[in-house]
Amino acid sequence: MSQNLSCWRTGTVIVKRLRSFDQIQDTMEKKVTSSLCLSSRASTSVTGLIIVCTCFCIRKLESAQFTVIGSAQPITAIVGQDIVLPCHLSPRMSAENMEVRWFRNYFDTFVHLYPDGRDQNGQQIPEYRGRTELLNSGIMNGNISLKIFNIERADEGQYHCFVQDETANAETALLLNIAVVPYSFLVYVMKC
């Protein structure tokens, strides 16, 4: 794992930039061994304790990573009906203070945007204005499903659900197929 890791605790940087988790483990083993061998030296013990706490914090940070899970199968909707594009975080965690962005082809033009606990749809694609809703009732449990009202033929295609917090981001794609029900079938169903 050769990414830079940072660990924050109440806004204070505890560890500035560590090149890899292996480097942390090597440093920790050396310092803890040194600490155990020279336990009479208080400064070495404190250094060892700081490194152990730092590694615990980084392990906790790594465990806070998430993935975005959507439907592996295409979603099929009928013109005129409302549809939910299912999506959730794994492991289940609150997405209330994360950015949730639903978009089609381009990241900057979005179907629905939910940054920092509120909907922000001023720059929303005009065709979706007033037709989308993030299902907020489950957002505390990681449910970030998108409801689209009054499905149109043009809504067919791929949708991306992108989620980001301070330390990580993840994305999944879903496919929406649109079915057109013949008028004669609707008349038959209404008669029954």
Image: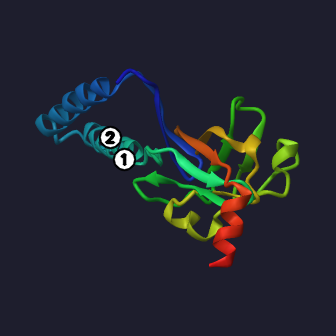
Q: Assign a secondary structure to mark 1.
A: helix
Coordinates of residue 1 in the picture (x, y in percent) = 34, 24
Name, please, the residue furthest toward the left.
Answer: 37
Figure label count: 2
- Foreground: 97 or 162? 162
Quadrant of residue 19 within the rendered picture: top left
Is disc 2 in contact with disc 1, using a CB cutoff of under 8 Å? Answer: no
Front position among marks 2 and 1: 1
Image quadrant holding the C terminus, namely bottom right
| Res. 55 mark | 2
Is residue 82 visible from the viewing direction of this image?
A: no
Give how far across and how far down residue 146 sits, in percent. 64, 55
Q: Determine whether, in the image, residue 18 is placed left or right of residue 135.
A: left
Question: Which residue is label 1 attached to?
Answer: 63
Foreground residue among 50 and 17 = 17
In the image, residue 48 sits, relative to residue 27, either above or below, namely: below
Q: Which residue is rendered at x = 32% and y = 28% of the image?
A: 21
Badge 2, how many Cα within 10 Å: few under 14, some, many 20+?
Answer: some
The x, y position of residue 136, in whole percent, is 64, 66
Going by the numbered disc 2, the residue's amino acid type is: Cys
Task: Using the rendered image of the protein, determine whether residue 161 is visible from the camera's viewpoint.
Answer: yes
* Label annotation for residue 181: none
Q: Residue furthest bottom?
A: 192
Q: CA distance from mark 2 to mark 1?
A: 12 Å
* Front residue (pair 26, 145): 145
Q: Residue at x 59, y 48 (%)?
A: 11
